[in-house]
Structures are given as C-alpha cells and as structure tokens.
Amino acid sequence: MDIMDHIKQAIESNSIILFMKGSPEFPQCGFSARTSQALTECGVEYATIDVLAEPEVRANLHRYADWPTFPQLYINGELIGGCDIVMEMYENGDLKTAVEQASK
C-alpha cells in the first residue's frame, strides 16, 4: 500500500487519531506527552501511531495536511493541530466536547 493511502486509511478508520512520537504510555517528546495526556483526561478512546516506529509516516505525514510538526491530532478526518492548539482546546473545554461527539 502506498504510504499516502496508509495515512489516509488510518485517519479515515479512526474517529480520533493522534500521530505522536512514542505512545501514550511511553511518549518520546514533551509535546506528544502533553497532547496524549489531555486526550486521556477527556476519557475517550483514541488511536495512536508512533511516527518514530513508522519512519515513512513521519517523513510523509506533513504532505497529507501541510502540517510540519508532531504531534498531529485528527478528529473525524479533520486535522485539529498540534500540541499548542490541543492544549488551548483542552483548557477551554472544546477538546472534551469535540472528542465526546466524535466517539458517539
């Protein structure tokens, strides 16, 4: 499967997916740790892809949505953004609302 098709399939088959460095249990950067912790605290299930374990994803994900950094959060196929945007949404309550709606 082409890497762009792999990325598209991962995003389309998961209502909430986080492309991060490491895993929620063992994050490999502070930004990924903060983002996954915010999602976990919202109390919904979400998928993750470790871009360090999948170097082709890491090298090509920026082409999918023109976002250059990690982590990247997608909800219902839409790029939400990286750590700063997710943390802002978490702090004002928008993240919990968005993930709860997506997990219905």
Image: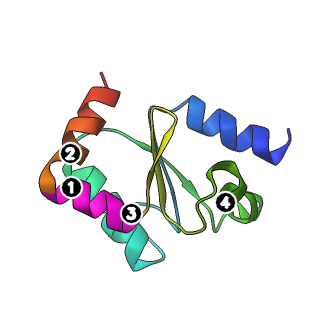
Q: Which residue is mark 4?
A: 62
Local crowd size for mark 2, using a 10 Å CA cut-off: few (<14), some (14–19), many (≥20)? some
User: Disc 1 or 3, which lies upstream in sequence?
Assistant: 3
The residue to which callout 1 is attached is: 90
Dot 3: what SS?
A: loop
Task: Measure the alpha-carbon separation of dots 1 and 4.
Answer: 24 Å
Quick one: label 3, few (<14), some, or many (20+) residues within 10 Å? few
Disc 3 or disc 4, which is closer to the eye?
Answer: 4
Work out whether mark 3 precedes mark 2 in sequence or the reverse, and give the earlier one: 3
Main SS of the magenta segment? Answer: helix
Quick one: quadrant of the C terminus? Answer: top left
Q: Secondary structure at mark 2?
A: helix
User: In 3D space, how far apart are the residues under numbered discs 3 and 4 (Cα atoms)?
Assistant: 24 Å
C-alpha distance separating marks 1 and 2: 6 Å
Tell me what residue is drawn at x 29 percent, y 51 percent: 39
The magenta stretch is 83-91
Q: On screen, 26 above or below 62?
A: below
Amino acid type assigned to the residue bearing label 2 in the image: Asp
Reading the image, the residue beneath label 3 is 25
First-in-chain label (1 vs 4): 4
Residue found at x 38% / y 78%: 30
Q: Disc 3 marks which amino acid?
A: Glu
- Locate residue 70 relative to residue 92 in the image: left or right: right
Query: Label 3 to label 2, Cα distance in Å?
Result: 24 Å
Give yes or no for residue 98 being in the magenta stretch: no
Q: Are marks 4 and 2 in contact (CB under 8 Å)?
A: no
Relative to the observer, which residue lies in front, 95 or 39? 95
